[in-house]
Image (cartoon, grey):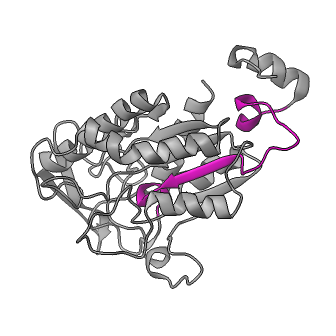
Amino acid sequence: MIIPLRHRSRVLAMAAIASLWFLATPATAQATGAHYVAFGDSIAANPTWQDQFEKRPDSPCRTSPDSYPVHVAREFPSFFNGSCSGAKMTTYPGERGTFSEELGQTIDRAVADQAIGTGTKVITVTMGANDKWPNAQHFGYYPGGSHITTDEYVGRMQPHITRLKQLAPNARIVLVGYPAFVESDGKFCPVNVDNNNGLPVRMELPDPTLKVHFDQLNHAMAQAADHFTVDFVDMTEPFAGHTTCAPTGQRWVTTVVNNPGERLLPMHMTAEGAQAQARIITDFLRR
């Protein structure tokens, strides 16, 4: 029996069950797969420098324990982490190869591990930033106007969403958007160091290109979610005020040059940012 969310408080009082997976779909004796399955690129995987470059012959994917999939997974009894630094939806002929995977390959791994099936309750996907778009690549630093379109995103993601729905018919599929690195006024701080030999160093520049790139990508993801009849979680608005120009502790994303001793990749999540992503996602799933 599916329990409507409006009865959640009564159910919790009666059964003392707080897990999100229980609220999503009914359990069956033959259900297979992890309750929560996460797919995504490095914005989901959030590896440190050490994570990114360590040798891992068992897997092409680099991940971190301080990432939103790992934090969200605490709400579930079982978890498959398919987040993979460098992952993309599609690789086109002539593109440089990486030690990462395409989304289809990661789904293949989940199938081989019997990690996705009728018992899977939630699937999150953050994907698109590493894909090569017409006239633009590498997070928009080669600008090309309106280079990311909904139709293009839908075309690349369609086979993956179709397959996920077939493999996990009871799962709630959620496209998780990209956070804001640049404030709404275009302010971007590639250098934001609190203590450099006793002095703070902060460089503030106008950078509309990066903002436009991620705005277009998030818009395409949101429209694609409507097309696929799946969910979309916006990260841009919650990250406002927590971008590269925010002080340490309030900054949810890393800059190009971070505080000395930090092992975080540039333009990824701080520890606070990964926790914020997870909190936003779990709050959304409870609706």
Above or below — where is 232 with respect to 48?
Answer: above
Q: Position of residue 170 (x, y in %)?
A: 68, 35
- Viewer-nearest residue: 11 or 155: 155
Identify which residue is drawn at 34% across, 39% down. Answer: 154
Identify which residue is drawn at 45% across, 42% down. Answer: 176
Q: Identify the magenta region.
A: 17-46
Q: Position of residue 7 (x, y in %)?
A: 75, 15
Q: Position of residue 175 (x, y in %)?
A: 46, 40
Figure quadrant of the C terminus: top right
Can you tell which quarter of the image residue 109 is in? bottom right
Figure quadrant of the N terminus: top right
Q: Is residue 199 magenta?
A: no
Q: Position of residue 244 (x, y in %)?
A: 29, 52
Question: Can I make out residue 278 in this image?
Answer: no
Question: Can I make out residue 132 in this image?
Answer: yes
Q: Is residue 34 magenta?
A: yes
